[in-house]
């Protein structure tokens, strides 16, 4: 009998650990999605989309804009006047939206799109992490804490290393975690940038590509095939998961980390232990009939489902607890690697021609 204190996800994980739950590679039902609304963005190339308080924010090589998915007209769409493409996903900061590329990072009024400030790169702007008070971003080998109201530098951190901090830091419970590309991970005090601890793993990786905090665990994807679980208070490595090949990205929802490995599997991993809860086969090399295309879009979870967009323009929907594939949604045109699932069998997508689209199935 299953204890009343054991929820479905933990019960499924227990079955998997005991070898009682199969790994999945079966094909799901296929349903053709319909594009029910289109918005021309004015961009040739769109960055990943953002969902903020019931609105979609987009940016690209020319403009930054806001969309209400229930309306035919774009709420606003303004030239961003950046000297290079906006390549980072827009991020919310109070009443501002943060957008930018490698040469500049700026803030625009969320209501009407009026520009508030622009930070010009000292060397090269990396992917930002935004809180309600500050935007944390690598610029060259430094980490800058920019005040969201003014764009002024509140503090900066550098360990005097020669590297380019391209990937985003992350912030949780008063601590900023920063991996600039020198094989070290730094934990800094959010208020003033003072060092709390640092972890040296340069024999294993150079960059930390993506970081999420879940409970007391920092889940860090590295510029190798390793995913790490690191104690946020001590910097001690609790577990390592070897994906078998390069990890493009990973996603954490609740107590589970999801990633796709180029070996042809999606994994669901327990954040606390690093144990595999389930895995789903996407590629059987040599058997084209069972293959997915490689996955370049970030995995997304929504309403206990996992959304995976592959490079064959197929959106796969998996059960978050078991990994069983529920649905396949083939698109008839090329898409950018970004998915915003909505309730009611809908998702906002971005076409390769610069359109933002609402799909229904």
Image (cartoon, helix red, strand yellow):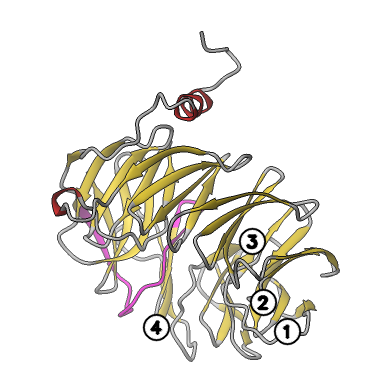
Provide the residue designation for mark 3. Answer: 94
2 or 3: tag closer to the N-terminus = 3
Marks 3/4 in contact by CB < 8 Å: the verdict is no
Left or right of 71 in this view: 98: right
Q: Point out the frontmost of discs 1 and 3.
A: 1
Q: Point out the frontmost of discs 4 and 1.
A: 1
Work out which quarter of the rendered image holds the C terminus and state it. Answer: top left
Q: Between 306 and 44, which is closer to the camera in this rendering?
A: 306
Q: Point out the frontmost of discs 2 and 4.
A: 2
What secondary structure is found at the residue carrying circle 4? loop
| Disc 1: CA contacts within 10 A as few (<14), some (14-19) or many (>=20) | few
| Disc 2: CA contacts within 10 A as few (<14), some (14-19) or many (>=20) | many
Whole-percent x, y for residue 240 in the image: 59, 51
Determine if residue 273 is in view: yes
Provide the residue designation for mark 2. Answer: 182
Provide the residue designation for mark 4. Answer: 62
């Amino acid at each position: 009998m299953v204890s009343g204190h054991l929820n479905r996800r933990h019960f499924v994980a227990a079955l998997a650990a005991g070898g009682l739950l199969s790994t999945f590679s079966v094909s799901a039902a296929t349903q053709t999605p319909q594009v029910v609304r289109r918005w021309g963005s004015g961009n040739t190339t769109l960055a990943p989309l953002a969902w903020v308080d019931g609105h979609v924010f987009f940016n690209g090589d020319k403009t930054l804009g806001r969309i209400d998915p229930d309306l035919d007209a774009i709420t606003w769409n303004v030239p961003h006047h950046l000297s290079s493409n906006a390549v980072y996903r827009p991020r919310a900061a109070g009443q501002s939206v943060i957008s930018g590329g490698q040469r500049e990072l700026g803030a625009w009024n969320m209501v009407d799109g009026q520009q508030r400030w622009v930070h010009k790169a000292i060397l090269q702007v990396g992917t930002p992490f935004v809180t309600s008070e500050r935007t944390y971003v690598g610029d060259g080998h430094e980490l800058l804490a920019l005040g969201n109201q003014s764009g002024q530098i509140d503090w900066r951190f550098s360990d005097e290393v020669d590297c380019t901090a391209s990937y985003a830091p992350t912030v949780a419970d008063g601590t900023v975690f920063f991996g600039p590309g020198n094989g070290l991970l730094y934990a800094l005090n959010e208020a003033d940038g003072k060092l709390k601890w640092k972890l040296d793993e340069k024999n294993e990786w150079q960059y930390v590509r993506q970081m999420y905090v879940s409970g007391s665990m920092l889940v860090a994807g590295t510029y190798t095939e390793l995913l790490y679980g690191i104690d946020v208070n001590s910097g001690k490595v609790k577990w390592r998961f070897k994906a078998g090949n390069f990890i493009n990205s990973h996603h954490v929802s609740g107590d589970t980390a999801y990633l796709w490995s180029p070996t042809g599997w999606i994994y669901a991993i327990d954040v606390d232990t690093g144990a595999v809860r389930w895995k789903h086969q996407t590629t059987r090399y040599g058997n084209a009939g069972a293959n997915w295309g490689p996955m370049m879009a970030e995995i997304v979870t929504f309403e206990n489902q996992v959304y995976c967009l592959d490079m064959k323009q197929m959106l796969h929907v998996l059960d978050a607890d078991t990994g069983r594939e529920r649905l396949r949604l083939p698109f008839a045109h090329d898409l950018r690697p970004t998915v915003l699932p909505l309730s009611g069998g809908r998702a906002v997508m971005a076409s390769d021609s610069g359109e933002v689209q609402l799909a229904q199935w």
